[in-house]
Image (cartoon, grey):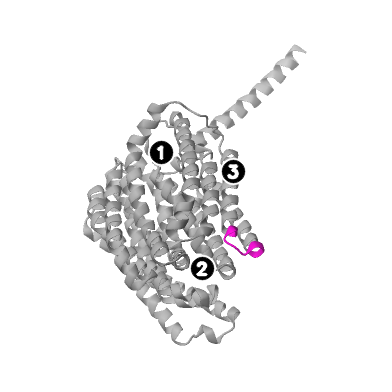
Amino acid sequence: MKGLISKEHLFYMEKFNLLKKDIIEDNSNKLLKPKKTLPQKMVQGGAWISSLRIARKVFSLIRLIIIGRILDPSDFGLMGIALLSMAALETFSSFGFKQALIQKKENTASYLDAAWTVLIIRGFIVFVTLYLVAPSVAVFFNTPAVVPIIQVLGFLAFFQAFSNIGVIFFRKELEFNKVFIYRFVGISTNFIVAVVAAIILRSVWALVLGLLAEKVVSLIISYWIHPYRPHLSKDIEKAKELFGFGKWILGSSILNFIGEHIDDIFVGRVLSATALGFYQMAYRISNMLETEITNVISSVAFPAYAKIQDQQNRLQKAYFRIMRLIFAVSLPITIGMVLLAPEFTQIFLSEKWMPMVTAMQLLAVAGLIKSIVSAGSPLFVGSGYPNFEFYMQMIRGLTIIIVIYPLIIFMGISGAALGVILSIAGMLVIWYPLSQKITKASWRKYFDSFWPPLFCSSFMAGSIYIAKLYWIPVQQPLGMAALMFVAIVVMSICVYITAMFLLQKYYPYYDIFSEVKFLYKSLVRR
């Protein structure tokens, strides 16, 4: 019996040793498995944020087409005035805490409660202020119907302040797949509620209800998707420390607001709410893709630059990878928008929106310049130079203040669009030398990133021009005209990609397709 037990014991000991060996080897393989590099995280983050932006813009475009056919331009103007009022107060009370939390290299968990507490206090102040000033805003724009809309949006600003600040870690650690989930649910909710409400109510309140539904759902999701639970804090010192960095963000935000919205203020005040509706619709459509490119860059590049701000070579390589992508995408989009704006408006939005076409074309050009200049913003802030962004926005704000009024008087909403172009172009004077100072790059790197997509876009423009010579949409049924429009867009994209492929074959320096391959490999390794 004793011998039998010994054999059993030896048998199980041998099995245990084999199992332990397998476990050790498995853990060793996991340890040896390479972690994702920062460029991989940047590209993967870009993929997730791009997917989110594409989803948002697809929903937004479909919503604009559906609601634009139901509501009048004056309804969009009313909503624009209300959102403008809310954005003004939120901007002038912004502390830049979220950017400061992302930029800090050390542990930031201890700062979250202080930041969350200040944001709630700020949200309450915004709500009370908007509620009280709503009648004055209505008098300023001569639109009494905007009063209850502003007051409802003011409460929404306070409600939104209670969102879980822990989601800031998703951006800090480049976990943009979670950002996608967090934002997508709110976007889809806005789409469904706004469209249904527009069909039923046929008023501006459809837009208000859509936004309200999005913010409520987003707040709930923020606590579901991240385990952090914020608490009210009395730690004033931590709030002051965050504000030390954020004060430059505040200054830049104020100047950015002036540059972004002073045209809306003048259009609504000098012209009318209806003119503002035309102008804002033109801006949304013309900048739909360029703005999203800029937002993707800011969301992904800023935390990445913050991680490599002390590594010159990696910083330069990352910056010009982004620049090449911006030029390769923004240039053909702008040219296509300028050439096809009349047909798009007539087919998808109807004749009542045709007065905005010229403004839409000009704003598309402004969007191109903005996407280029805005590539410097995450570089400046992520590298620890938020004052550079402040100076750039200051040039923009001063320029738009000087030129906007006379241009609107002489050219209407097209003059406002031209003023936007001039103000953003003025930022180039600051953007180029400052970005060159940080990256230590020569002018040749900028030029080599720009001319290949411009060259290929000229072939695309020629194909669109030829197609338009033989196509008159007003002579076709709506469905056939829409199908032809899509066919021309697809054809122009194919021409551009083919031109890029041939250029890359004979000029291998500009290998934009390698960026796509890098993206694919990075996603596969996840």
Q: Is residue 407 above or below residue 113?
A: below
Q: Position of residue 248 (x, y in %)?
A: 32, 42
Do callouts 1 and 3 mark residues in contact (Cβ within 8 Å)?
no
Which residue is under mark 3? Answer: 221
| Residue 204 inside the magenta-drawn segment | yes
Residue 17 visible from this viewpoint = yes
Q: Earlier in the sequence, mark 1 or mark 2?
A: 2
Within-10-Å neighbours for mark 1: few <14, some 14–19, many 20+: many
Residue under the point 60% across and 39% down: 224
Image x and y of residue 474, in percent: 53, 84
Marks 1 and 2: which is nearer the front?
2
- Under circle 3, the secondary element is helix
Give the mark, 3 or 2, whose residue is nearer the N terminus: 2
Q: In the picture, residue 306 is in which quadrant?
A: top left
Q: Residue furthest right?
A: 1
Where residue 422 appears, as percent x and y from the top left, is 29, 64
Given this view, does label 1 or label 3 mark the residue nearer the observer?
A: 1
Residue hosting label 2: 73
Q: Nearer the viewer, residue 151 or 515?
A: 151
Q: Residues within 10 Å of mark 3 (few under 14, many from 20)?
A: some
The secondary element bearing badge 2 is classed as helix
The stretch of residues the image draws in magenta is 199-206
Instruction: Looking at the image, tell me whether mark 1 or mark 3 is earlier in sequence order.
Output: 1
Q: CA distance from mark 3 to mark 2?
A: 33 Å
Work out whether 245 lies above or below 418: above
What is the spatial separation of the Cα atoms under label 1 and label 2, in whole angstroms? 37 Å
Q: Is residue 503 inside the magenta stretch?
A: no
Q: Amino acid at mark 1?
A: Phe
Q: Nearer the viewer, residue 458 or 144?
A: 144
Residue under circle 1? 97
Q: Amino acid at mark 2?
A: Pro
